[in-house]
Image (cartoon, rainbow, N blue to C red):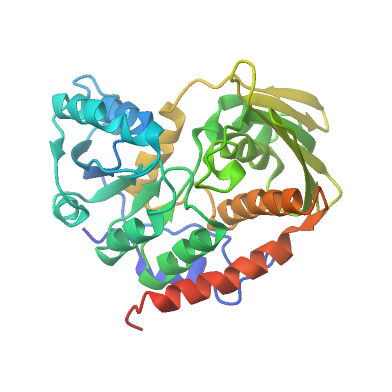
């Protein structure tokens, strides 16, 4: 199923000479035609997202906007060493089987049966290798958060996407809260600053904010947009506070919590006044964007923004390591960009 205008994808999404703030990653890939049907495969049955997406797409009374798209196969393995992931898999296998999903024993077997892929593995560390298999097969995909287990791997993923001409996008569902989208669309005028919050539970195998803080950081970027130049971080046992300073002088903050009730939201401060961000209502708005991407090939979020989000979080880790010192995002990005090039060279891909 060749649905993308590959020449235009190369032109719009080229990464040559990428540097933070100067990246050519600004335009989405554009489809050569709209697709009205597609067989979807899932990799990773270790997250509730897999179940939620399958229920919405495979329901007998599925919404008209999803008609023609159905989850037909799944490769269950997720993380091998994160208990919160591994313990879910047996039950989730049974749930998706009841919804008509075939369980397969390898990614290679899955790719023979599907047109599109939802990479749902809760563990970001294997995403680079998993996504590479799909790119080689020419399968467009959505990669759930975290896009990768390191900033290096995230940069490598987008570089390979351009090299192999297979687009993908990644996003937290918090990006598509109605209030966040309203703020981003100008309901209260230009956003002058924002304070966003979410749970920020830690997982030792991942950079601190990649595992769960990504939700609040994604909300922050939804309303603020790109252009953060530096971050400082303060951490206690139960709380994270990361302050970002944007190139135009605006300030955005992320508060991550590990105590009390888990909630998501924030406040964006617009020229016309503040707007409350929230409440979070679930995955449907994200699924709408995923299916629209599968239909059209148009990326709902630029690679540039996603990469800056992960650079922001990695810079927050660097600030923590340096006792709360202000860290420049460009310096962090440049370091990991060099590492990503070495990672790609080690893959020994044909030129």
* Residue placed most toward the observer, 66 or 123: 123
* As drawn, 194 above or below 295: above
- 1 relative to 242 in the view: left or right: left
* Residue placed most toward the observer, 66 or 139: 139
Q: Quadrant of residue 218?
A: top right
Q: Farthest residue toward the right? A: 249
Q: Which residue is drawn at 50% across and 43% down?
A: 171
Q: Which residue is drawn at 13% across and 30% down?
A: 100
Q: In which quarter of the image is the N terminus?
A: bottom left
Q: Which residue is drawn at 15% across and 24% down?
A: 98
- 184 relative to 42 in the view: left or right: right
Q: Which residue is drawn at 49% across and 57% down?
A: 28
Q: Farthest residue toward the top? A: 261
- 300 relative to 88 in the view: left or right: right
**Residue 291 location in percent, x, y?**
35, 40
Q: Quadrant of the C terminus?
A: bottom left
**Residue 305 location in percent, x, y?**
60, 52
**Residue 289 location in percent, x, y?**
43, 39
* Residue placed most toward the observer, 253 or 226: 253
**Residue 169 location in percent, x, y?**
45, 50
Q: Is residue 329 visible?
A: yes
Q: Quadrant of residue 135?
A: bottom left
Q: Can residue 226 be seen in this view?
A: no
């Amino acid at each position: 199923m060749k649905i993308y205008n590959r020449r235009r994808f190369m032109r719009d999404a080229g990464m040559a000479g990428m540097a933070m703030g100067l990246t050519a990653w600004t335009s989405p890939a554009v489809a050569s035609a709209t697709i009205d049907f597609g067989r979807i495969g899932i990799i990773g049955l270790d997250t509730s997202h897999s179940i939620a997406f399958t229920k919405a797409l495979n329901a007998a009374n599925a919404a008209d906007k999803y008609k023609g798209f159905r989850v037909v196969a799944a490769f269950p393995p997720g993380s091998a060493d994160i208990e919160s992931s591994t313990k879910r898999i047996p039950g989730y296998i049974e749930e998706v089987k009841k919804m008509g999903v075939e369980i397969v024993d390898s990614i290679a077997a899955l790719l023979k049966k599907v047109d599109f892929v939802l990479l749902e593995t809760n563990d970001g560390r294997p995403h680079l290798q998993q996504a590479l298999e799909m790119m080689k097969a020419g399968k467009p995909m959505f990669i759930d958060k975290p896009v990768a287990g390191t900033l290096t791997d995230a940069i490598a993923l987008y570089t390979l996407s351009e090299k192999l001409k297979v687009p993908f996008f990644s996003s937290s569902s918090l990006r598509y809260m109605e209030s966040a989208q309203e703020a981003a669309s100008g309901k209260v005028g230009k956003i002058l600053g924002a304070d966003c919050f979410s749970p920020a539970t830690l997982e030792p195998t991942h950079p601190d904010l990649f595992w769960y803080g990504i939700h609040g950081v994604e909300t922050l970027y939804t309303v603020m947009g790109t252009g953060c130049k530096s971050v400082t971080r303060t951490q206690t046992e139960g709380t994270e506070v990361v302050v970002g300073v944007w190139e135009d002088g605006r300030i955005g903050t992320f508060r991550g919590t590990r105590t009390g009730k888990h909630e998501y939201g924030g406040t964006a401060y617009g020229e016309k006044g503040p707007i409350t961000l929230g409440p979070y209502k679930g995955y449907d708005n994200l699924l709408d964007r995923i299916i629209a991407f599968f239909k059209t090939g148009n990326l709902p979020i630029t690679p540039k923004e996603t990469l800056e989000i992960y650079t922001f979080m990695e810079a927050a880790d660097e600030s923590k390591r340096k006792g709360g010192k202000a860290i420049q995002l460009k310096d962090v990005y440049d370091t990991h960009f060099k590492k990503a090039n070495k990672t790609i060279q080690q893959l020994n891909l044909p030129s």
